[in-house]
Image (cartoon, rainbow, N blue to C red):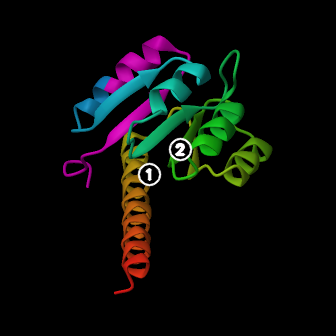
């Protein structure tokens, strides 16, 4: 699966060394990676871009992962966001899922597991885009009286 996965991903983490190493590993698997080192930067990068998935660190200084998740989803509820953290708790995982996260993974993350989740996010995003397109076509047809 990982060899055929072509996805556009935003990777958000305050640890620049982690971002550098992990983005290179994902790019080596054929993914197009954009990075952000914090919540505000992630929100700016997500505006007007079609990311198949956003991989978001939970524990970041300033705007944390949960607040970033809430803001991203308030601006675009169709975003597919995977939470990645080294400080996992059941409570945080539940809260992230309630706020619309697609999944919640612990660091160090298995690369194949993350690629699987990114594939799921891309598939779900495609379905959302197709549904919106169908609804738009239906609205056009109804407005024309055809």
In the rendered image, residue 4 lying in the magenta stretch gets the answer yes
Quarter residue 65 falls in: top right
Q: Residues within 10 Å of mark 2 (few under 14, many from 20)?
A: many
Which quadrant holds the C terminus? bottom left
Residue drawn 21% across the image and 38% down it: 30
Q: Is residue 132 left or right of residue 13?
A: left
Depth check: give the residue in front, 74 or 31. 74
Q: Position of residue 43 (x, y in %)?
A: 55, 28
Residue drawn 42% across the image and 36% down it: 48
Vertical side of 84 occupied by 121: above or below? below
Q: Earlier in the sequence, mark 1 or mark 2?
A: 2
Residue drawn 65% across the image and 43% down it: 74
Report, in whole angstroms, how far the alpha carbon at label 1 lies from the one at label 2: 8 Å
Task: Identify the residue under disc 1.
Answer: 117
Q: Position of residue 32 (x, y in %)?
A: 27, 34
Question: Do callouts 1 and 2 mark residues in contact (Cβ within 8 Å)?
Answer: yes
Vertical side of 72 occupied by 64: above or below? above
Q: Is residue 57 left or right of residue 136?
A: right
Q: Which residues are magenta?
A: 1-23
Task: Identify the residue under disc 2.
Answer: 82
Q: Is residue 75 left or right of residue 50?
A: right
Vertical side of 67 occupied by 114: above or below? below
Depth check: give the residue in front, 104 or 66. 66
Depth check: give the residue in front, 109 or 84. 84
Residue drawn 70% across the image and 49% down it: 99
In the rendered image, residue 5 lying in the magenta stretch gets the answer yes
């Amino acid at each position: 699966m990982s060899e055929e996965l072509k996805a556009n991903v935003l990777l958000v983490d305050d640890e620049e060394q982690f971002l550098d190493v992990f983005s290179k590993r994902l790019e080596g698997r054929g993914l197009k990676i954009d990075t952000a080192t914090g919540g505000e930067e992630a929100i700016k990068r997500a505006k007007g871009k079609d990311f198949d998935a956003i991989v978001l660190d939970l524990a970041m200084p300033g705007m944390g992962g949960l607040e970033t998740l809430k803001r991203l989803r308030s601006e675009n509820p169709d975003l597919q966001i995977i939470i990645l953290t080294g400080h996992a708790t059941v409570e945080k995982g539940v809260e992230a899922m309630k706020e619309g996260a697609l999944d919640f993974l612990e660091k160090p993350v298995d690369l194949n597991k993350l690629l699987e989740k990114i594939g799921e996010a891309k598939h779900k995003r495609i379905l959302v885009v197709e549904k919106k397109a169908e609804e738009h076509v239906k609205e056009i047809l109804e407005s024309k009286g055809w």
